[in-house]
Image: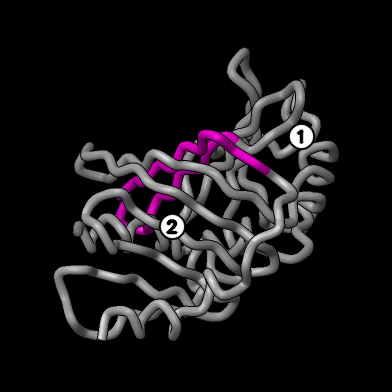
């Protein structure tokens, strides 16, 4: 497993910066309402790593603060956020998963219980074109840690992908497919200790 790529996934946020949050044609209010209503989802993802390599897998999301990525290859590779911590599972190692505070990753913005795009300093820019809308966000409390660009389709509004850019400039993009919002998800999927027990 490419641990560096997994860390990049957690580290920060991406692109479209420098533009006003209320750029022409961008309905920030509607997107904010969509994010508030997005409580759970599951589906598949395709991750493009900083070195250009790609990985695929399945994801599960449940707000607040919980997400799980199960990679197709290598078998057993996972990233789990339980609401407080993020556990990175490397099947090549018999050690416990490497843990990071969720609050230190830009991904935590997407997983907030109630996000407000009107929060001062949160939105760096917004753009809209034929492909949809991109919103660039950063944690106002830790703007130097990285940024994330969330991409949405327009009709209907739906989360399509996000791209995370670390403070060192490395970018990781996660495109979502077979996206199913509003599904019931077993909370045990986000239990880092339970997942770790299978590695021991």
Is residue 103 in sight in this rendering?
A: no
129, 23: nearer the viewer: 129
Locate residue 153, reporting x and y percent: 66, 26
Locate residue 23, reporting x and y percent: 72, 29
**For the stretch drawn in magenta, what is the main secondary structure?**
strand
Locate residue 115, reporting x and y percent: 75, 58
> Seen in the image, is 135 located left or right of residue 162?
right
104, 82: nearer the viewer: 82
Residue at position x 57%, y 34% from top? 160
> Seen in the image, is 31 located left or right of residue 109?
right
Q: Which residue is mark 1?
A: 22
Span of residues in magenta: 160-180
Residue at position x 45%, y 64% from top? 145
CA neighbours of label 1 inside 10 A, class few (<14), some (14 to 19), many (20+): some
Query: Looking at the rendering, in which quadrant would you find the N terminus?
Result: bottom left
**Residue 34 placement: quadrant:** top right
| The stretch drawn in magenta includes residue 177 | yes
**What is the secondary structure assignment of the residue under circle 2?**
strand
Residue farthest toward the top in the current orientation of the protein: 130
Vertical placement of residue 149 versus 36, above or below: above
Locate residue 27, reporting x and y percent: 80, 31
Vertical placement of residue 14 versus 144, above or below: above
Colour treatment of the image: one colour
Vertical placement of residue 162 versus 152, above or below: below
**Residue 62 placement: quadrant:** bottom right
Q: Which residue is mark 2?
A: 69
User: In the image, which disc is placed on residue 116?
Assistant: none
């Amino acid at each position: 497993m490419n641990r560096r790529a997994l860390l990049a996934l957690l580290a920060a946020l991406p692109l479209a910066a420098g533009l006003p949050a209320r750029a022409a044609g961008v309905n920030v209010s509607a997107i904010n309402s969509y994010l508030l209503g997005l409580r759970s989802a599951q589906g598949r993802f395709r991750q493009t790593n900083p070195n250009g390599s790609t990985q695929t897998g399945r994801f599960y999301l449940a707000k607040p603060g919980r997400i799980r990525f199960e990679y197709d290859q290598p078998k057993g590779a996972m990233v789990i956020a339980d609401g407080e911590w993020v556990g990175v599972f490397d099947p090549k190692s018999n050690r416990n998963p490497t843990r990071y505070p969720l609050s230190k990753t830009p991904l935590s913005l997407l997983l907030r219980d109630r996000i407000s795009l009107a929060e001062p300093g949160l939105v760096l820019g917004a753009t809209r074109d034929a492909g949809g809308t991109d919103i660039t966000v950063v944690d106002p409390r830790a703007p130097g840690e990285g940024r994330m660009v969330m991409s949405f389709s327009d009709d209907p509004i739906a989360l399509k992908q996000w791209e995370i850019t670390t403070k060192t400039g490395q970018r990781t993009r996660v495109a979502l497919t077979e996206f199913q919002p509003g599904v019931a998800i077993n909370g045990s999927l986000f239990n880092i200790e339970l997942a770790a027990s299978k590695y021991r």
